[in-house]
Each structure stands twice: as C-alpha cells, then as structure tokens.
Amino acid sequence: MEIDLPPVSRALTALTLTALLAVGIPFAAAQDQTAPAAPAGAAAPAGMEAGEWRSWSSLIRPSKYGNDFRHYDFVNPDAPKGGRLNLQAAGTFDSFNPFPVRGTPAAGFAAFGGGIAYDTLMDQALDEPGVSHGLIAEAMRYPADFSSVTFRLDPAAKFHDGQPITAEDVVWTFQTVTRLSPLYANYYHNVTGAEVTGEREVTFRFNQTGNRELPNIMGDLVVLPKHFWEGTDAQGAKRDIDNPTLEIPVGSGPYRVKAYQPGSTITWERVPDYWAASKGPRVGRYNYDEIRYTYFRDQSAGWEAFKRGGFADYRSENSAGRWAQGYDFPAFRDGRVKKEAFPSETGEPMQGFVMNTRRDKFADPRTRQALTLVYNFEEMNRSLFYGQYKRTTSYFQGTELASSGLPSEAELKILEPLRGEVPPEVFTTPFTLPDYSDPAAERTYLRQAFELLTQAGWKRQGSQLVNAKGEPFRIEFLAADPSSSRVIDPFANQLKRLGIETSTRIVDASQYQALTNNFEYDIVTDVMAQSLSPGNEQRDFWSSAAANQPGSRNAAGIRNPAVDAIIEKIIYAPDRDSLVAATHALDRVLLWNFYVVPQYHNPSIWLAWWDKFGMPATRPAYAGIDPFSWWVKGEVAVNTPEDQAAAGAPDPATAPAIPPQRP
C-alpha cells in the first residue's frame, strides 16, 4: 500500500498547530536588547483592551464566546462517559518525559500542549483561529506596550495527586522547559523571565515591546508539578527531569497512565475527579473512560490492524489508493466501518522533499531549482493518487496568507530594501511550478534542469553527474516507513536521468527522530503546518539561528538574512493587513529560493472509523474534526472469522511493536 503523506494525522494538525511551531534561538539570547520598539499604532489583540482581565485571547478577531464560555457550540455537553478509544502509534517509546531532546515519548505525552497528561495556562480553540480560552489561568492581562503579560490562576486548578497548581509551579516549569527543550527555549526567545506577582498571579516579562503575539502565546505554556520532579521515586532515588523515564508522572490533564508495556502499548484512564471537567474547553469532551495506544512497526501493519478492529477505532487516511479502492473488506461492506471526507478551514500545510542546505551539494539555489523542475506531479497524481490531490504552491496554501501574482504595494515596502538579497524573480515573475500535463513537457524540463545544474558547477562524466572535484552527485532519501519508497521512486527515477545517483534509507521511528533532530540527511519529506496567525514560531521554521539548533523545525537549514528580516516584520506587524503583507513576502522569498520541492495536498480530511461512536451534529469549522468530542455509543463486533480470512495477514496482536530503543 502506498503512503502518500508522511505518517502525520492531518486531521489532528489543526488541534496542535502551535505544537509544531518551535523557534531556534538559544534562550540565553533572550537578553537581546536590539528588538524594535512598539510600532506606531500597535493594536491590542482582537477585542481586548490593555490592562483588562480577560478569560480569552485572540490574534485575529474577538472570540464569539466572550468571557461567558460554557462549552463549544459543536459539542454535546451531555455526552455520556464510558468505553474505550483504541488508537495506534508507529514505532516504539521509551519515556514518559517528553521535555528533554533525548528519548522517545509515549503516545499521549507531548512536550508542547501537554498531550492528555498536562494542562496549559490557556487552551487553544478548535473552532476559532488564533483564539485561546482560560484553563489553568482563569484570566490574563497585559500593558498597552505588550512588554509583559500576567496570568491569574484558577483556584480550583490541581494536579492528579490533589496538590494545587501554584504560581511557583508555573515559574519553575517555565525555567525548566526552556532549559531542556529547544521548542520552548526558542518559542519563548523574547521572554526574559517569569515571577510570582501575587498569590495566584504570574507575570512574564519580555525584552521588547510591540510584539502583539507574545501575550497570547504565553498561554500555551504547559504547567508541571514542581513537587513531583524535585522529589524522590519509590526506591528513594531523586527524580531527574533532564532524562527519559518510565516512572508514571503526576499530571494535571484529563487522563493519567493506567498501564503500559514498554515500547508496545500504553493505556490511559480518565481522571474521575479531573479539576477542569466543567470548564468551557473541556465540557462535552474527553468522554472515554480509557484510551489505549498500540504500537506497530509501520503504516502497513497499522492498516491491517485497523481492518481487523480492536486496535484502532479510527484513522486519518493518508493514501489515495486506499481511499479509492482499499475499503473493500467485510467490516466496511456490512457497515461496521464508515468513512467520510470532512472539510477544514485550516488551510493546507506545505508538504515536500526538503533539501538539506547544510550540505554543499544543495547550497546553490540553481541546483535546488533543477530538482524542483524534474518533479512530475501530474503523472504521479494520475498513476498513484487517482487524481485526488492538488499541487501545493505556497507555504500558506489555501489561506489569505498565500502569495500570488506579483507583489502588492504593501509587500514591496518590505521587499524593496532587500533587493539584491532576494532572487530577482520575486519582483518580476509570479511563482509557478512545472506543469507536466503535456507529455512533451518532460523533455523541456529535463533540459532546463540540466542547464541549471551546469551553471551550478555540475557536469556529465559518462553516466554520472559530478562536481569540479569529480565527485558524483549522490542523494539519499531518508524515510521512516517502507511504503514511502512508492512516492520517492518516481522522483528518484527522474533524478537518475540527469545522472544523479539516488538511494532510499528506511529507518525505524526512533532512528528517524534522532537523525532528523540532528539534521543527518540529504532529503526528507516534511510537513510544515502553519496557523492563520503566524508569528514568533516562524523563527524556528526558517531563521538562521534555528539552522543548526538540534530539534528545530528548520529542516532545510535556511541561513538567509533576507528571510530573517522578513520574519521580524511578521512578528512586529501592527495589524492584520501588515501581517498578511509580510507573510506574502516571506512566502515569495521561500518559494523562489527553492528550499523545498513542493508535493501535494488533500483538500479534505479523509476519516474512517468503526461505527461505535456517537458524534455531535456539527463539527468544529477550524479543526475540521474533534475525536475527543465523540462518545462510545456501543461496541461493534470485530475479529470475526470472515474478517480474519479476508485480512490475510498475521494477527497484529502477536507482535505489534518493535523493542524499545534509544536514539
């Protein structure tokens, strides 16, 4: 079975957009005093007045719920509790501590957002972009110049052991996670520190003014129990948050670990006295008594497990071939399994082959453009994807943030000072990707690609393309699933026609994480999801400082002063129009530098599920779906003799996972 998309659930992307946004500047640099002052006319986040206590924040428009947020419009507030949600995960795990770079966290834990184990100060909305609602913090406020933000904690907030969540916990957590995690250290690059400023109040101070996003994103901070991590375990040994551990931690979220088999399964149980069960972001959600994750070696094994039932109750489908023809098994034919395409308003993430510019062979943009020219999307879409995908042409596809045509006057004000530092085509030529709809186009694009490679210093020597030193041009594709080769091979074959040697290296999930964290690859397929309100996280994706920061999202190794300058324009945009213009400018510069060979996107969320769920009548417009707002209406029969015979594969329960490994 082909895997058209990397093993990332697009359906859940909208729920965790900010969790993908890390920035790559060492936290020690937070004392930088060169940040610009507040721009003239800087406005507060939508619908908020400086100094006013609010139970929500927004970067785009006022929340439709205001301060009286009782529950989301799309949920069933009286949804019944009970039953088990079965999910699957790929690879293995060896830690219940997601914060250090070392180790592979178990499913359900997440460094950013807390997963289902920990709560955050504020909770990102599922049905409104750029909006967060109070969770651990019952309210927030900030001064007119955005130089700080203060959160007032909910007196009811507590950890699973009954201890209250205190302002001291917040300060300790901030200091700890920014020390351990590149994600937090760089996301909060401009935060100089946190301090207790009242009995239940914490204030974060910034090294700059005018950054409208900073008060909002501070609400994304997870809060950990200081007393647990500074205590001792059952054997009397002092705990060490700096290292992986399989000791079950004390959390604060809706679930806690009930049982696990290292590297194989983990079962979570709903916390019966969960402190936030009656708060707006949680009402009608987290209805399952248990959530059980089973690990499988790869996506193919996971698919077989889904067909049998009992191992995964729903899946976000990432294969066009499967979606078109694969759902022909007994449980689907008799209605026990259903599928549907759901719309989403999140836009589409850039997915593509990312070239590692830290390596000399990809340093010249003409080389990168040549590789982009030989990618034949039209043929792949016809022969592999049943014509169901669309070509991705922007890093902000499907949103008002995507550039098109030539730069507007507002964009030119940003780009003109950078003339000479950005590709000249940015000013003169609308960006387009090669179109192979005409079969004769292949010869044209191969010729253009070879001319660009020649200009970049490559030459043909026999059947090989070599550089000035006579070294052959070799490319290794790194992937974490054997099925990836089905998508890589057509592109690799085109490269071979130019004299480029190619190979594909398939590794397990833990190795893949370790290698990508340290940028040890030629080309990887990456998904660069964006929110509708880009800001500080753009440093992690594209900035020079992030290029060599292990664990950053700058997979391409971009070190471009012009990109750095435009990122700052985004961060300090005084209003929505300015933000859109700056994002358009960034999009153009990234595209014309050819850091990524853009692939494709699915304009819908393809979801399949066993018919055991009750679902709300409406869905969250922004996220598209919210499986945590479903409930179990009754189990359905799985693993019938007919199912087993039709599946024709070994029972995945016999050996679903691989042994735990450390990177």
Image: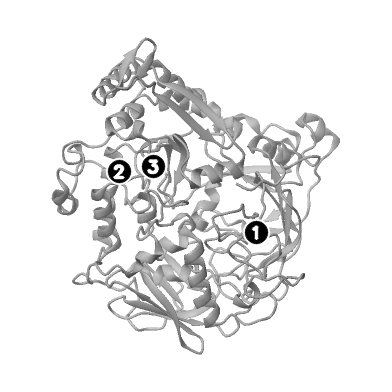
Q: Position of residue 430 (x, y in %)?
A: 22, 37
State whether residue 187 is above or below residue 238.
above
Colour scheme of this structure image?
A: one colour
Q: CA distance from mark 2 to mark 3?
A: 11 Å
* Closer to the eye: label 3 or 1: 3
Disc 3 residue type?
Ala
* Residue holding disc 3: 556
Q: Amino acid at mark 2?
A: Leu
Check whether the beta carbons of the residues at disc 2 and disc 3 lie within 8 A of each other: no
Say whether residue 209 is left or right of residue 178: left
Q: Earlier in the sequence, mark 3 or mark 1?
A: 3
Asked if the residue at tag 1 contacts the one at tag 3, i.e. Cβ–Cβ closer than 8 Å, the answer is: no
Residue 590, label in figure: 2
Name the residue located 80 percent from the left edge and 43 percent from the top edge: 638
Q: What x and y, as percent, mark residue 169? A: 55, 78
Quick one: which residue is furthest to the right in this view? 641
Q: Which mark is residue 630?
A: 1
